[in-house]
Amino acid sequence: MDVAKYIGLFLLKNGTCYIHGLGNLEYRRIPAGYESGKLMPPSHEIAVVAASTIDDSLSNFIATNEQISISKATQAVKDFSTAARAELALGRTVEIPSLGVLQEVNAKLIFDTYPYLKNTGAPIAAEKGMPKRHSEARSSKPEPQVNMPQPERPAPDYTYDYPEPEKSKGMGWGRIALFVFILLAIIGGIGFVLKNMTRPGDRSEMPAKNVKLPKADTVASQMPTDTTAENISPAITDSMGRIQFKLILNTYSTRKKAEKRYNQLTSYGNTVELKAEDSNTYYILMDIHAPAADTAHVIDSLRAKFNPNGVYVY
């Protein structure tokens, strides 16, 4: 494992690298300066400084790249440091590839950076306090300002001619007639709605369930006995004490709708009758035979099965 190569890579990537037992290497930038009548450009160098804290970043970097454990990488760095101190004690140098060499001068550890890494440019001859050239001095004087006369602009005209508002010509007979016509139409519509609300309309368009419903006699025989009974009129009482009357299941305004409902109920096995009250009123009737005490329950049962909006005695 080439620990010196990883030291150089880590130093160029992070700008600083701590080496256990040797110290801290820093990659620095030296700013431009003036020396011996020459302007020296900025450069770079690598310096050895005393380490203030212990850092294991180099060991982690080596372990990641070599796919080994951190403990093995730390041990490799310690072995490199021990070997480097032995070489420096003998007066030899320790090379960091492509960067420079470590050497000990007067019992002090220094780093000699390779020249190509310093990125130094050629110095520029310059003198401090050099007077300006005559052309530069003359150009530096501010030119006198010449106030050019500005042409006078005419003042804008903010006057506008607004059109005179037209005089009102009054309401007119045509508008009065239109208003009266709309008012009569509204009154007629309200009367039509109230008339349809007071009469039983097509409130019974509820489709029957796709099951065979029991006949009225069967429903009446299954209902429990109740002491309260509705006054059914007109009604016929037979010898058995049962009341016979007709019940309006549905009401329609057209014969076509009434026949459709009639065919639907009869297809389910119900005995019903289509009654034309007039040209705009058609009833679906059913004969009911029930005890007087059970009529209310019979009506409630038929309302739930045939028309939740309500059934009525004919």
Image (cartoon, rainbow, N blue to C red):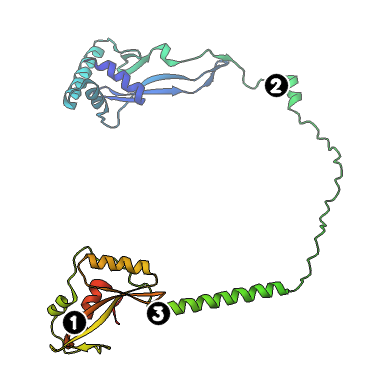
Q: Which badge, 2 or 1, comes first in the chain's sequence?
A: 2
Tell me whether circle 3 and circle 1 mark residues in contact (CB < 8 Å).
no
According to the picture, the residue beneath numbered tag 1 turns out to be: 289
Name the mark nearer the viewer: 3 or 1: 1
Q: What separation in Å lies between label 3 and label 1 (alpha carbons)?
A: 27 Å
Residue at the spot 17% in from the left edge and 83% down from the top edge = 290
Mark 1 surroundings within 10 Å by alpha-carbon count, few (fewer than 14), some (14 through 19), many (20 or more): many
User: How many residues crowd mark 2 within 10 Å: few (<14), some (14–19), many (20+)?
Assistant: few
Distance of label 2 from label 1 (alpha carbons): 132 Å
On the question of residue 195 being in view, the answer is yes
- Secondary structure under tag 3 reads loop
The secondary element bearing badge 1 is classed as strand
To which residue does mark 3 refer?
Answer: 199
Query: What residue is shown with label 2?
Result: 132
Percent x, y of residue 91: 27, 10
Dot 3 amino acid type: Arg
135 to the left or right of 287: right
